[in-house]
Amino acid sequence: MTTTDTPLDTRAAAADADRIAPAILAIVFGAFLVLGAGFLHSSTIHNAAHDARHALAFPCH
């Protein structure tokens, strides 16, 4: 085994880590948009999220 070879388990773990981080960020960002900005009392933030949901064809009412 040379120094450039990595065990299969190490490569698989690295591939899993590369997929998990963006997935977690997408979930957190999506939860903020739907639950945070969509239900805040500030009408400006609410209207911006509402317009963005309509622009993406996401029904909200």
Image (cartoon, rainbow, N blue to C red):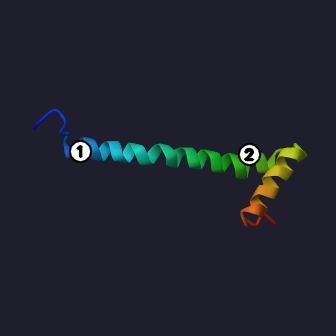
Query: For the N terminus, which image quadrant?
Result: top left
SS for tag 2?
A: helix
Identified by mark 1, the residue type is: Asp
Residue 33 in picture, x, y percent from top left: 71, 49
In the displayed structure, does residue 31 sit left or right of residue 23? right
> Quadrant location of residue 57?
bottom right
- First in sequence, mark 2 or 1: give its number: 1
Identified by mark 2, the residue type is: Gly
Residue 15 in picture, x, y percent from top left: 35, 47
Q: Which residue in the protein does label 2 denote?
A: 36
In the current view of this chain or complex, which residue is farthest to the right?
A: 43
Mark closer to the observer (2, 1): 1
> Quadrant location of residue 7?
top left
Which sits in the foreground, 53 or 4?
4
In the current view of this chain or complex, which residue is farthest to the top?
A: 3
Residue 59 in picture, x, y percent from top left: 76, 67
Query: For the C terminus, which image quadrant?
Result: bottom right
In the displayed structure, does residue 34 sit left or right of residue 4? right
In the current view of this chain or complex, which residue is farthest to the left?
A: 1
> For residue 9, which numbered disc appears in the image?
1
Marks 2 and 1, how far apart at CA: 39 Å
In the displayed structure, does residue 58 sit left or right of residue 41? left
> What residue lies at 16% left-to-right and 32% top-to-bottom?
3
